[in-house]
Amino acid sequence: MFAKRTNWNLTPNRLSEALAAHRAAGKPLVDLTVSNPTECGFEYDSSAILNALSNPAALSYEPNPKGLESARRAVAGYYADRGDAVAVEDIILTTSTSEAYSYIFRALCDPGEELLIPSPSYPLFDFLAEIQDVQLVRYPLVYDHGWQIDFHALEQAITPRTRGIIVVNPNNPTGHYAKQMEITKLNSICAERGLAIIADEVFLDFAVDGSRPVSFAANSGAPTFTLSGLSKICGLPQMKVAWLIAGGPQNWKSEALARLEIIADAYLSVNAPVQLGIPKFLEQRHAFQKQVISRVRRNLAELDRQLSAQKSVSRLKVEGGWCAVLWVPVTHSDEDLALTLLKEEGIYVHPGQFYDFSSCRSQIVSLLTPELQIAQGLSRILAFLR
Ligand SMILES: Cc1ncc(COP(=O)(O)O)c(C=O)c1O
């Protein structure tokens, strides 16, 4: 009765099962995977956020497939503040970056066509692609005193069915930004072969060193879609606001926007009260980002303090984002180690395989974890691995 694309294996993985059992038994848990910013103890200006939702203009309905112009102007203002010129008419609002991906996948790919994704990276792509009948092909990122794209392997992964290359900037969970040299190379590969760059920049603003990394939003060297949204920028995932920006050669951009506008018109998915609140929500980002960056820095300093007292575990370099990759000795598979840490120590971490790490030496911890919790969790992991 059902489409083959929904023939998912719905049995929970071993770690999720063990976590559910651990919780059901009421055992203490040090969760080092927390990523919901609304539950990490950050302060929000509640009245500003709630007031932004009570604009009387929300009492009338003005459907606009791209989203209300006032809201898109605020998004363009966000880019202008970081020095990137983005035109209001090049922005389309969506309820999530996942929805933005789905619009783009539908506009770019016929069933069975391919998109390249980085490996390691964020695990959601597999589902998004499957739902849209898109095939994903991985291109490796390599680590050598920092992460970079393996361009030789990337070019070899391109086939006549490839329609675009996804870049996560900074990547989750490796936390590395696309460098200008890499952007130039991606532009030349994509422009030459008629491929689109799809740049996910939800963590763009969270550079650990406080720098302002290059965005793809104003990229003109190749067909480009840039995605971002309020869930990370402002720590407001519950508002369900994201966007995509089309950029690149003018003819391509106009065609892309015309097609995407029709997809967006079929759903008209972003509601009016939230769209009217976007300017105010975006104002909240400064206070939110300041708290996150300072927690991330304190957590990294604590990790480094503890790691410097031993030799078996280290961490990979983090440029931005909300995660750190611990590099542990090979004992069992990374999933087995995560299971053992959960069952024996009550510590919850994500094994690297969740993010497509090929080595079994990585365990991922969230740097949004409150400071005491991460200090306690790490010291128990290190004692366990000693
Ligand atoms: C790289 C990346 N892109 C997109 C998302 C999801 O963003 P949204 O809430 O806008 O769908 C996440 C969520 O963790 C993410 O890590």
Image (cartoon, grey):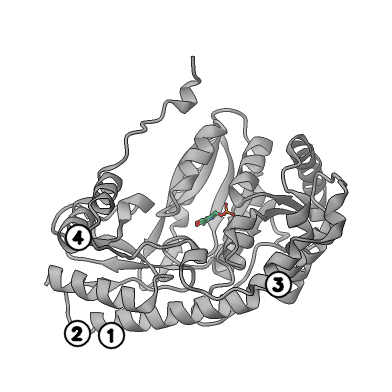
- The quarter of the image holding the C terminus is bottom left
Query: Circle 4 sits on which residue?
Result: 341
Residue 212 appearing in the image: no
Give yes or no for contact between labels 4 and 2 (Cβ–Cβ under 8 Å): no
Give how far across and how far down residue 317 sits, in percent.
38, 73
Residue 89 or 370: which is nearer the viewer? 370
Q: Where is 192 relative to 46, above or below?
A: above
State the mark number for residue 197.
Answer: none
Report the residue marked by disc 2: 309
Q: Are marks 1 and 3 in contact (CB under 8 Å)?
A: no
At horizontal 22% and vertical 62% (from top left) the residue drawn is 346
Q: Nearer the viewer, mark 4 or mark 1?
A: 4
Q: Secondary structure at mark 2?
A: loop
In space, the residues marked 3 and 4 are separated at their CA atoms by 41 Å
Q: How many marks?
A: 4
Residue designated by label 3: 48
Task: Point out the tag, 4 or 1, that comes first from the N-terminus.
Answer: 1
Answer yes or no: do the residues labelled 1 and 2 have beta carbons within 8 Å? Answer: yes
Q: CA distance from mark 3 to mark 2?
A: 45 Å
What's the amino acid at mark 2? Ala
Quarter of the image for residue 230 reads bottom right
Q: Position of residue 324 (x, y in %)?
A: 37, 69
Marks 4 and 1, how far apart in space?
A: 21 Å
Going by the numbered disc 1, the residue's amino acid type is: Arg
CB-based contact (under 8 Å), mark 3 and mark 4: no
Q: For the residue marked with disc 4, what is the amino acid?
A: Leu
In the foreground, 292 or 50? 50
Label 3 near ligand 1 (CB < 8 Å) = no
